[in-house]
């Protein structure tokens, strides 16, 4: 009988961040995150796939052969020798591994980069693997995920490496045209040609904490223009603050975050259409809407306790995933948006966001959006159109932010672009004024197929205070201005600016958020059922007719006894 072997001694590693000893088994169990300083060590492609995918769901994606060492390149060593060394050390053919699999039970295709293979550099073989994975996602009709880790293009393959930026871009464009969701997970580092192509071309961009993303890395910037970068520049947190990525995600949360996103965007189950079975919650007859003092309605519309967009999102949608950033400069917090499931269908929800406390109101700029907010809304609307998702917008703002920075950044252009976009989006759009609908800042989210207003909401070209200040030289004449402007729901229904009025709980929506959300849910069931199956061409034509009729003929309002 063989002699029993003593257990292996625990193995300890030194963290490269804090230089403290870390127990290897715990380090692996914690996904290579240091328990002392929180530093993220790099994962191999194999480790990343194991972390993200459901066990037993993975199969490889076939990839065509590519040219090797096209330039017969040699620096301090021949390129072919570098390739042999990298293959021996990593067990990989090249810097990208392509697989089919599932995350949270949802199928997808992924291309996962490995920095250990020549710094994850993008050459012909890596580019072919990215394109092959994208083609497989297109063939299967499932989402495409790319996990990036790269120093940039592979210099040893010259201009052929540069061409991989175009090749992978074309593969992503094909997915966009087909309406297939694309997601990138940015890990540290992601630079150069990878950052300037597929890494930042996806619909949703997630990044690990501390991951660096940029075109030129700090060393290149220092060596070329002698410029020292500020602390934290190009990190995931910096990029999130500047509207360039959707979310910064801790490594342990990546898998559940991806699962929630895939679940939220998954197509509705065949034959599952609960919209048809819900009774109407919309008041459409003029005689059923009582006459009220517009100023009284205005005061209720401004109640700080009224539900916000995020309050409604939590009660209306299953698995809501908020998306961030305008992909240009900022993530305006006065407008929020994301994907969730309404009545079993994936939808895009976008709305103004205020708050319930003085601090929340300040942080959300009192619901007054900057240009970045409207650009973010426009980005999410375009994503909804590509994926074929209905759009629900919730409007509650005094108006667009009128400050110096907003004007310098093109506030009028941002609003105008959203109006143009909404005029031709080929998916159903329902807008609901949930509080104050102020001027172009409100209309920028409300050029819709159906426009509803809550019982205690208002919609106007200008605030009563501003109207009174301009026309009566006295802002205190706001109540008089509100009556003159006819901003209340009954008048909005009379002129068909609103297609219906949604009742509120006794005393107003601020008194019972749950009941207010239930009434809104019933109303959305009702109007979405009318338009959700219409084709894009008809939606655009009827939307144009709806808004084109304003001011050209007497308004028609339905009453109990007929038409007015």
Image (spheres, grey):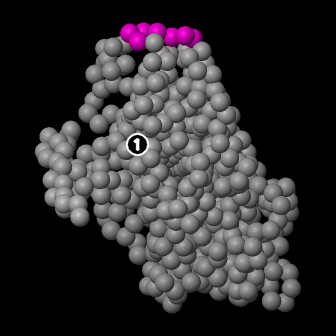
Residue at the extreme left of the image, as rendered: 20
The percent coordinates of residue 65 (x first, y second) are 65, 30
The percent coordinates of residue 184 (x first, y second) are 52, 46
Tell me, yes or no, if residue 480 can be seen here. Answer: no
Query: Which residue is denoted by mark 1 in the rendering?
Result: 44
Q: Nearer the viewer, residue 255 or 402?
A: 255
Q: Nearer the viewer, residue 416 or 494?
A: 416
Q: In this image, 469 relative to 281: left or right? A: left
Residue pictured at 33% horizontal, 14% vertical: 223
Q: Residues within 10 Å of mark 1 (few under 14, many from 20)?
A: some
- Secondary structure that dominates the magenta span: loop
Q: In this image, 1 relative to 516: left or right? A: left
Residue pictured at 52% horizontal, 69% vertical: 319
- Stretch of the chain drawn in magenta: 71-77
Q: Nearer the viewer, residue 269 or 455?
A: 269
| Residue 374 among magenta residues | no
């Amino acid at each position: 009988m063989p002699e029993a072997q003593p257990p292996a001694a625990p193995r300890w590693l030194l963290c490269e961040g804090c230089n403290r000893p870390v127990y290897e088994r715990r380090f692996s169990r914690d996904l290579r995150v240091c328990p002392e300083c929180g530093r993220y060590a790099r994962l191999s492609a194999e480790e990343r796939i194991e972390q993200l995918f459901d066990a037993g769901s993975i199969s490889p994606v076939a990839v065509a052969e590519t040219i090797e060492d096209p330039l017969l390149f040699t620096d301090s060593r021949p390129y072919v020798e570098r390739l042999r060394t990298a293959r021996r050390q990593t067990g990989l053919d090249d810097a990208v591994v392509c697989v089919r699999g599932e995350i949270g039970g949802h199928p997808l295709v992924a291309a996962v980069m490995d920095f250990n293979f020549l710094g994850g550099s993008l050459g012909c073989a890596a580019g072919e693997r990215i394109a092959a994975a994208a083609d497989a996602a297109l063939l299967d009709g499932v989402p495409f995920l790319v996990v990036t880790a790269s120093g940039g293009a592979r210099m040893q393959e010259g201009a052929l490496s540069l061409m991989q930026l175009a090749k992978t871009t074309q593969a992503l464009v094909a997915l966009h045209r087909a309406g297939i969701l694309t997601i990138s997970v940015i890990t540290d580092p992601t630079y150069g040609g990878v950052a300037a192509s597929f890494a930042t071309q996806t619909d949703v961009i997630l990044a690990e904490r501390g991951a660096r993303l940029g075109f030129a890395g700090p060393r290149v910037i220092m060596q070329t223009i002698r410029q020292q970068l500020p602390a934290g520049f190009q990190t995931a947190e910096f990029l999130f603050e500047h509207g360039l990525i959707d979310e910064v995600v801790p490594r342990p949360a990546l898998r559940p975050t991806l699962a929630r996103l895939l679940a939220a965007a998954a197509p509705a189950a065949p034959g599952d259409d609960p919209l048809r079975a819900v009774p109407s919650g919309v008041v459409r007859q003029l005689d059923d809407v009582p006459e009220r003092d517009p100023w009284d309605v205005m005061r209720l519309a401004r109640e700080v306790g009224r539900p916000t967009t995020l309050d409604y999102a939590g009660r209306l949608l299953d698995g809501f995933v908020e998306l961030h950033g305008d992909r240009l400069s900022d993530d305006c917090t006065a407008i929020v948006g994301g994907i969730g499931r309404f009545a079993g269908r994936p939808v895009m929800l976008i709305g103004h966001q205020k708050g319930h406390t003085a601090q929340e109101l300040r942080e959300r700029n009192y619901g007054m959006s900057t240009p970045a907010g409207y650009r973010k809304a426009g980005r999410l609307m375009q994503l909804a159109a590509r994926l074929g998702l209905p759009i629900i917008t919730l409007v509650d703002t005094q108006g667009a932010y009128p400050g110096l920075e907003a004007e310098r950044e093109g506030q009028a252009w941002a609003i105008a672009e959203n109006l143009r976009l909404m005029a031709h989006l080929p998916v159903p759009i329902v807008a609901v004024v949930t509080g104050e609908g102020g001027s172009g800042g409100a209309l920028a989210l409300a050029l819709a197929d159906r426009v509803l207003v809550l019982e205690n909401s208002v919609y106007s070209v200008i605030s009563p205070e501003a109207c009174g200040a301009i026309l009566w030289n006295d802002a205190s004449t706001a109540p008089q201005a509100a009556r003159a402007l006819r901003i209340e729901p009954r008048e909005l229904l009379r002129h068909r600016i609103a297609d219906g009025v949604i009742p509120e709980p006794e005393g107003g929506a601020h008194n019972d958020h749950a009941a207010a959300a239930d009434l809104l849910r019933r109303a959305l069931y009702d109007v979405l059922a009318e338009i959700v199956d219409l084709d894009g061409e008809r939606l655009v034509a009827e939307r144009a007719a709806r808004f084109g009729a304003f001011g050209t003929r007497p308004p028609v309002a339905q009453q109990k006894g007929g038409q007015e």
